[in-house]
Amino acid sequence: MRCRLGHRIPLVLLTGMAAHGADTGAILLAREVHDLGWIAFSAATPAGDWDLFLMRPDGAERRKLTDTPGFNETGVRFSPDGEHLLYYRQPAKDPVDNNTYGTHELVIADAAGEQPESFGNGFPWAAWGPDGKALAVLKPDGIHIVEVATRKTVRTIPRKGLVEQFAWSPDGGRFCGTANGLGPSWTIGCLDAASGEIRAASETERYNCTSDWTPDSRHIVYARGIIPNDGGRAELWRATPDGTEKRLLYAEAGRHIYGACASPDGRHLLFTRSEEDLGRVDQKKTTMAIIRMRDTPLTGSPAMTNRLDLGPGWEPHWRPSK
């Protein structure tokens, strides 16, 4: 994929930030992340369907990866080497939903979105393996380790209650995902690939979801949700795989925080901000943002000065620099 590698933030972007009263901290953050690879995400088009898009981490050089009016494309994830991506495709008439997108047709393409190859509907909640040559798939009878080249299952592991929003650790040793059966509510479960032991990484009395790994495999970032019937907002938290250490990363009044993704160097966090408790995704009420890991925890007004807003989009993923 050929892309311009300029080192300066486009004047139009900085001007737009200033015009909207953006703090100097956000402008500095934009300069800091501009050359740190690329971000892919889903967003609605004027026609009403959802396509995949690519942009710099500061929001510059935005372009389409897919252009398919008859389909919605969601759940994009880059392979560990940044050369390929997987995503899910569904008919445009079917609403995009945070809890079901990974149950549709799996597609694998190169990092520019070209040469797409359909794997069909038999690969739910697929996650890249550490070398990019295998996928972990949450099938009804277990976690299937599937060779990308042959599409053959080479190993099956009991899923132990993992149900969706699934990720394989970069070191290959663990899986994390939304789980049932570890407590009264949805929990972030962490399953050891060798022993098959599963533990709750998050609290168990809350609805927790959309987990992912930090690049060093030492922590899981996730949405810490509400206690049933208690109200509140989903927040961005981090936990150790065994659940013994948990801490707040980001919380915002008036927004639920979902879909956290660490930058390839682990120094920044990319996430979705939603006015609604997802479920069904409303493009008009769903945006993306970046913060620095070192600035956390962020809450209230200080978060505004250390947050880079990236505009409409959902379920973003960060590609390494190439």
Image (tube, rainbow, N blue to C red):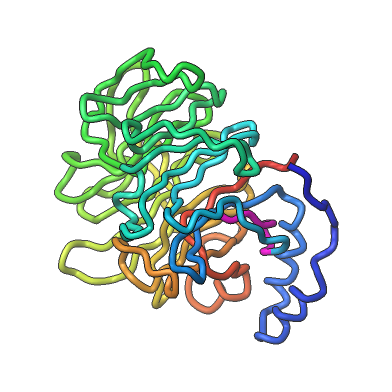
What's drawn in magenta, residue-wise? 53-59
Between 38 and 204, the one lying in front of the other is 38
Q: Is residue 172 magenta?
A: no
| Location of residue 190 in the rendering, given as x and y in whole percent from the top left corner | 34, 34
| Location of residue 189 in the rendering, given as x and y in whole percent from the top left corner | 30, 38
The residue depicted at 26 percent of the width and 36 percent of the height is 162
Q: Residue furthest toward the top?
A: 154
Q: Residue furthest toward the front?
A: 70
Between 298 and 85, the one lying in front of the other is 85
In the depicted structure, whether residue 121 falls above or below residue 14: above
Residue 115 visible in the shown view: yes
**In this picture, residue 84 sits left or right of residue 222:** right
Q: Is residue 54 magenta?
A: yes
Between 197 and 168, the one lying in front of the other is 168
In the depicted structure, whether residue 298 falls above or below residue 163: below
The residue depicted at 41 percent of the width and 58 percent of the height is 258
The residue depicted at 55 percent of the width and 38 percent of the height is 85
Q: Residue furthest toward the right?
A: 7
The residue depicted at 54 percent of the width and 37 percent of the height is 116
